[in-house]
Image (tube, grey):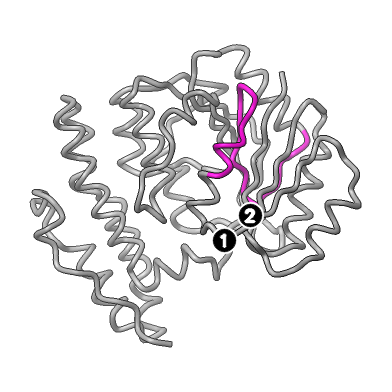
Amino acid sequence: MTVDIMLPFYGDPSLLRIAVRSVQSQDDPDWRLTVVDDGYPDDGVRRWFEELRDERIDYRRNAKKLGANGNYRRCLDLIEHDVAVLMGADDIMLPHYVSTIKQVHRAHPEAGIIQVGVELIDENGKPYRTVVDQAKQRLYAPRVEKSRLMGGEELATSLLRGNWLYFPALAWRSDALRDKGFRDGLKVVQDLALVIDLLLAGETMVVESKVCFQYRRHRGSDSSLRALTGTRFIEERRYFLRISRELEARGWHCAARVARNHVSSRLHALTVLPQAIRHGHRSGIQNLIRHAFMPARADRGTRRERPAIPPDAG
């Protein structure tokens, strides 16, 4: 069984090379890596892939820039095998990642998603864990001794209470991934939205405790900057309120209530607030306070919500 490893790229070429080398170091060689370069302005990236001379690696460069979400969709179009991974261009697969995914898939071929154990590293490859990561692993993630099959409202409620997944480490049954795809208009919460949509479609997830992936957190990442200005929470709130109505219509009332209240997202905004104050992000401060304390009952559509306050210029 060949595993499709899809790697959308626009970032640091040195970290990309580390990610690719980690794929090449897998103890199971039956994989195919497809790198989709979204027009990174450095022709050295293309030359480096040409010099690899590894027939399992397919490097492609988009004719025009698609943006992060567009490039993810492009990756979905290029999947050919039954199991696929959407890897981050700065993350690291430990040598037994592919073999672990295959083992879990053979045991649970019906599962649409596999989440393996993850280590957190910083931009320098050193162990790194934020308050949010500690909350994910200690408060929200289910207790799993070896592996556990989950699905339905139980899993949806757990993830909406606190999204403990690490998206680039997930493996997917390709037909389920392609059939559902990413929701339009999302830049921050598209990974959670995809998983919830698959659960609503009847898919299940295997949570595997074996650690075989390193997820890289960057202190200056785009998601961190969006958090600082509060814009990521505006998108999160809109999504949570929208999905709460869909869950209610499905009869998943507990999951709907958790989404409507989105307590962990509110708490996350409060943890970012001191940084926004220190950096003098006036609009960010207002966005964060609004997200943390706006009543959950304002859930009858996003039209009634006040418009986002844009980040301060400069």
Q: Quadrant of the C terminus?
A: bottom left
Residue 307's spot in the image, x, y percent?
19, 69
Q: Are marks 1 and 2 in contact (CB under 8 Å)?
A: yes
Q: Which residues are magenta?
A: 74-95
Check residue 75 for magenta coloring.
yes
Asked which secondary structure carries label 2, the reply is loop
Disc 1 secondary structure class: loop
Residue shown at the point (47%, 43%) measured from the top left:
137
Horizontally, is 21 left or right of 160 in the view? right
- Residue at 56 percent across and 27 percent down: it is 208
Residue 90 in sight? no
Other residues around mark 2 within 10 Å, as few (<14) / some (14–19) / many (≥20): few
Residue at mark 1 to residue at mark 2: CA–CA distance = 6 Å
Q: Amino acid at mark 2?
A: Asn
Residue with the mark numbered 1 = 65
Residue 198 lies in quadrant: top left
Magenta-drawn stretch contains 259: no
Is residue 312 positioned above or below 116 on the image? below
Q: Position of residue 53 (x, y in %)?
A: 91, 44
Q: Which residue is mark 2?
A: 62
